[in-house]
Image (spheres, grey):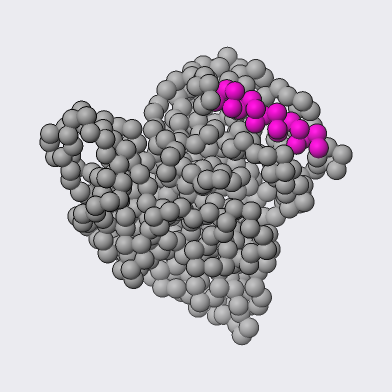
Amino acid sequence: MVTSRRIFIRSGCTLGGFALLGRSTIAAAAQKTLELPMVNGKRELATYPQKRELMVMTARPVQLETPLSLVDKAGAFTPNDAFFVRWHLAGVPTTVDAAMFRIKVHGVVHEPLSLSVADLKANFEPVEVAAVCQCAGNSRGLFEPRVAGGQWGNGAMGNALWKGARLRDILNKAGIGAGAVQVRLNGADGPVLPATPDFVKTLDVDVALGEDVILAYSMNGAALPLLNGYPVRLVVPGWYATYWIKMLNDIEVIERVDETFWMKPAYRIPDNACACIVPGQQHVETVPINRMNVRSFITSFADGATVTAARIQVVKGIAFDGGYGIARVLFSTDGGKVWTEAVLGKDHGRYSFREWHAGFTPKTGQHYDLRCLAINNIGESQRLTPRWNPSGYMRNVVESVRVSGV
Amino acid sequence: MNKRSRFASILLAALGAAAASADNASDAPATVQIVLPAETARLAPGPNLAAAQVCMVCHSADYIYMQPPLTRDQWRSEVVKMKTAFGAPILDADVDAIVRYLMSQNAAQIATGQEKGAD
């Protein structure tokens, strides 16, 4: 826990080397950037279509990170225009005619279907679920030793109230045939090159039939932003976002375990209790990443902040897990030596962000190492030491926010 | 306003209803069209820059510059992954050249980034 979490905004050209080639006069103008606490952590801030100003991790394919300060402002539900964006392949449709959009259901089914968005709304029971969407690699940039991949800070997560039709109801309408093993889910995005594996993800039939797995056409009471999967994305509450296929247009029931690229070797975790290895360890059995672990964050103070002394400071944050629900959040001002019980906010359901708050009275000139530790309803808690795996997945160590009283 | 903000625009050609009211089942779904901001990151000068331009076929330059400094073996495994798993049109003969370019960018990043604190 020696990395600096200091986050600050400043103006200047992003990575000086870029300025030497191919910059127009407009591009050479000062850009707002934000510094994540990692080497090469400078991120341009930019406003994308249907989005407010977010951190640009990569422009193509589009990957945008939500600053934690926005999570703090939003509380339990992340506004659609603040929600992080992550595409795997650059062939993202930029025009979507939702009236013409069709979702094919085929494979090992009795009756193949072709469903419009209107069909989803009119012919299937609408279901609402508050659920956290979190990238498997959220916080990858904080891994030590560092690993290659999308270098997220902690902002590849958001919570929304999703509304849509159950995948189960759709599969039951099509009628799952004998021998069905998994359900393959594909979206309208695609690769630049035909040789690149299309981004397709697959769930076991029993997961796909879960009562909370929905084809969402509404996010926080509005249509999904295009960059979050308009007009329909899969929502798999409790599971990492890699399965939440955006612009979902193809559902195939298959008779085998899918071992194509994005299921194997991509998005795999070590097949052990901690999903971790020692750096350099070889020949480790792996399984597809699946349910999220428990996490919590302090959102109301940035690392390195100064706080007014001699009065009660309210520390706010959020906690979530993979669907058991948050039972407790503990709070410490001394790096985890002494813990006190934080107060939990409103319960929006077991898949949602759970707000929490705690208070402390800083003294002038004193330094504090603020930490929070969440425990879910089956007793799982966050790790006190970070796990390591080669893909940078599933970080859930107790994070540290250092502040000083003034 | 930075460049992206100026270029970012959205066109909502609603067929009967605004997309924002999609919650209502009776609303006709809308066509949504977006225009993505132009990329700002470019590959910086370095040895074998021409060979490295192949990377830009599938992704923007910031995909490279966000990475932590990687070892020669790590960069090589990334290049080989792009070639074999993702089908990038990289000639065997160019792998070493691209790895050399990427190694040069490690140093460039550190020189322009946090180490010197220069913007």
| Residue at screen point 55% across, 80% down | A175
The front one of A106 and A88 is: A88
The front one of B81 and A252 is: B81
- Residue A145 in view (yes/no): yes
In reply to whether residue B98 is colored magenta, the answer given is yes
Residue A365's spot in the image, x, y percent? Answer: 22, 29
The image quarter containing residue B1 is top left
Name the quarter where the C terminus of chain A is drawn. top left
| Residue at screen point 48% across, 75% down | A209
Direction from residue A19 to residue A362 in the image, left or right? left
Residue A359's spot in the image, x, y percent? Answer: 18, 45
Q: Magenta stretch: give its range.
A: B96-113
- Residue A97 in view (yes/no): no
State the predominant SS element of the stretch in magenta. helix
Residue A218's spot in the image, x, y percent? Answer: 40, 55
The front one of B35 and B3 is: B3
Vertical comparison of B3 with A165: above or below: above
The image quarter containing residue A103 is bottom right
Residue that lies at the very extreme toward the left in this rendered image: A311
Name the quarter where the N terminus of chain A is drawn. top left
How many numbered marks are there?
0
Direction from residue A146 to residue B49 in the image, left or right? right
| Residue at screen point 64% across, 53% down | A280
Vertical comparison of A377 with B33: above or below: below
